[in-house]
Amino acid sequence: MESHLRSLGIDVTNNKRRRTSLDSDTALPAAKELRADRVCSSPSARSWSHGRPSLILVDSLLGCKKASQDLSQQKLLAVDFEGVRLSRFGRLCLIQIATRSMVYIFDIISIGPSVFSDGGLARLLNRKDTVKVFHDCREDSSAIFHQFGVKLQGVFDTQCCFRVLSRHRDESLSVPNIGLNALLQRYLGVSHQLKSDIGSRMNRDCELWLRRPLTDQLIEYAQLDVSLLLPLFDALKGELTETGVATETVMRESARYAQYAMLNQHISDPSELCVGMLLEGLVNHTTAAAVHIKLGVCKEGVIYRSKNMTEAKPLHQLCIGQLVTVRIRSITVTDGLPRISLSLHHVGRPPYAPSLHQHCYS
């Protein structure tokens, strides 16, 4: 089998490097707020705890075609992207896709745009009947749509799922967007050990993911980022079933995350932003001082409560993930990207304004 894959241009590696905290011959330890039997009863959690999925690095078009054909037989996949300032205006470098037993890392830099058309990844990522497990897919969706014209569909977002479950537990509607490591600790009792180190390197070196060949550490980071998502999906799905929350509710909120790519398509460059302009955005998180808005065209937009006293009541009612229309009050530049002060114009979309989502995700 391995020789056959290599003949197709696929480099096959059984990755035996295991971090001590994650390499265990026993079931994953239970997080404090999760029953041990939920973790241990998950087949993927048990198999992952005994050894990571095998790794296939795909760096040729022929290999991509074969891998896409194999993946198209699956109904459940975990997906993650890596890149330079991964966003609409950044650069996508890797796509990682995991099954229960295999992690495929597609090298977009080496293969080029044909990975989506001729290679078959566009069809795979666009299929509604294949569930793709992401953690916060917003910038991933924006990157793949604006750079390659690919629409992401069939998403189950673990960040959205946690927010849905938190609301069901009568927690605040403005529960913060939880990070992947915090979610892994809560549900699986493990963490992505390389997150902090590689994250710091990415901040210092914006071309980290562009260099070839990829280092072993970067490959391990990319593998871990995606291979932990299916065990996490099992644990979250178990809690959805236990609490009676419909999976469709999570899928609907996840679809809104994927549609983040469609926001403000009339802006082709951040330099076009100006004071007084109306924009659409998604509420990202709230604090006592401000409401932070993701706009898809800049680092972040912020509604400062002290500057919007007349809007105090509607601001208090905003919840994370909600669509809002905002107006630019002022623009400053941080790290070469604009940071925007906003005022709330409308909760949702004004009745007279056409939807920026209307041309996609039919």
Image (cartoon, rainbow, N blue to C red):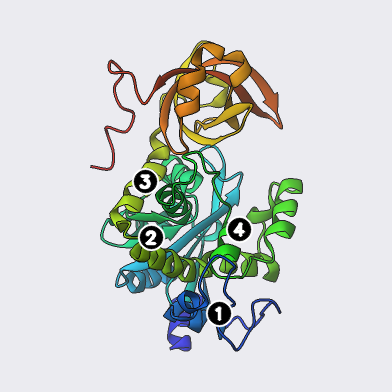
* Mark 2 or mark 4: whose residue is earlier in sequence: 2
- Residue 292 position within the rendered picture, expressed as x and y whole percent measured from the top left: 56, 31
The Cα–Cα distance between marks 1 and 4, rounded to whole angstroms, is 20 Å
Furthest residue to the front? 170
Type of amino acid at the residue the image marks with label 1: Arg
Tags 1 and 3 touching, CB below 8 Å: no
Tell me the residue at 69%/68% (across/down). 217
Tell me the residue at 72%/46% (across/down). 203
Q: Mark 2 points at which residue?
A: 132
Tell me the residue at 33%/18% (across/down). 350
Residue at disc 1, secondary structure: loop
- Residue 238 position within the rendered picture, expressed as x and y whole percent measured from the top left: 39, 68
* Mark 1 or mark 4: whose residue is earlier in sequence: 1
Q: Mark 4 points at which residue?
A: 182
The Cα–Cα distance between marks 1 and 3, rounded to whole angstroms, is 30 Å
Q: Name the residue under label 3.
A: 253
Tell me the residue at 42%/26% (across/down). 324
